[in-house]
Amino acid sequence: MKAAVLTEAGLQIQEVPEPQPEANQVLVRVKASGLNRADLIMASGRKHGSRGGAGAIAGLEWAGEVVEVGTVVDGIKAGDRVMCSGGGGYAEYAVSDWGRTALIPANNMSFEQAATLPVALQTMHNAVVTAGRLLEGEAVIIQGASSGVGLMGMQIAKHLGARLVIGTSTNAERRARLGEFGADLALDSSDPEWPDAALEATDGQGVDLIVDQISAGVANQNMKAVRVLGRIVNVGRLGGFSGDFDFDLHAAKRIDYIGVTFRTRSVEEVREINRLMRADLWNAVEAGNLHLPIDRTFALDEAAEAQAHMGANAHFGKIVLTV
């Protein structure tokens, strides 16, 4: 089969053996694959947990038709239209654990649309609800809100009853569109004074929860913008892996600073994350109330160009490969 493979010379299209499903896996004929920032990390030579390294097939989420299921898989059968997460999605065929495989809603959702959802839904439900402990009526900031995962985070917060949703983006055009996806207020995270606007919007108290995809460059500003006993969930490191941290401010506000990643989670943990997400959100997904815009589509043969487009940071929403 054809696949986009990580090599020392970069991402290359190669012919590789078709994967075979294990007892707990689903084999899918891929129709579309979503791009994620972690794909760029792996293409640069870094591993993403156990994923990546020379010879690995890129891609963390995809949608397509089930070809075969393993012996312990229940509720999924050959011919089903599904969306999946895992590894090896930039290919004509891919396998996913049954717990990371969901039926595409029967509401005319395309494979391209379905391929945008798995990572964003599971990542942000876990960050906002499980780690972030969002309660109805709370105020939330999503840092890096114009990414696909960020746009989903705002929608989830609004869907679950947040009274105030603030999204950040350094790009004025993208900030202008955040309201379409749940933002009540859009701020520029490159402006050193943005925490003052967040405090003003919360009557000086600060927000209850920040879901942070930037980290290093905004760590101290986040702590200024969050309330006493607030929560900050560290989801991404777009602004750097290390930086200045005001430990005294952290202690003074008694902030819960929570790190999350899928890299160190077991298969069972990821299954539970997906189960909880579907329990809370699947009705909204089926109704079309949780969705992501597709910025641009590329053919599988253009996978390297698609990643370059993401690396240029000029997109809004998701970039999708069609297979």
Image (cartoon, helix red, strand yellow):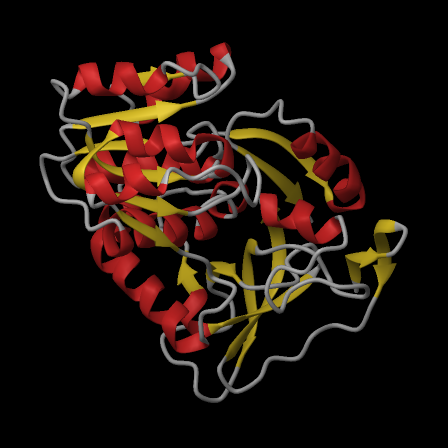
Could you say which quadrant of the image residue 204 lies in?
top left
Q: Is residue 43 left or right of residue 241?
A: right
Instruction: Pinpoint residue 200: horizontal percent, then vertical percent.
Output: 19, 14
Could you say which quadrant of the image residue 107 lies in?
top left
Q: Which residue occupies 33% across, 53% down?
A: 258
Vertically, is 105 above or below 287?
Answer: below
Q: Is residue 248 left or right of residue 192?
A: left
Q: Is residue 262 left or right of residue 322?
A: left
Instruction: Pinpoint residue 257: horizontal percent, then vertical percent.
Output: 32, 49
Instruction: Pinpoint residue 154: horizontal percent, then vertical percent.
Output: 31, 33
Q: Which residue occupies 58% across, 56% down?
A: 60
Instruction: In this rendered view, identify the residue nearer to me: 18 or 221.
Output: 221
Q: Which residue occupies 81% across, 66% down?
A: 55
Vertically, is 176 above or below 62?
Answer: above
Quarter occupied by the N terminus: bottom right
Residue 121 appears in the rendering: yes
Residue 290 appears in the rendering: no
Q: Is residue 273 left or right of residue 254?
A: right
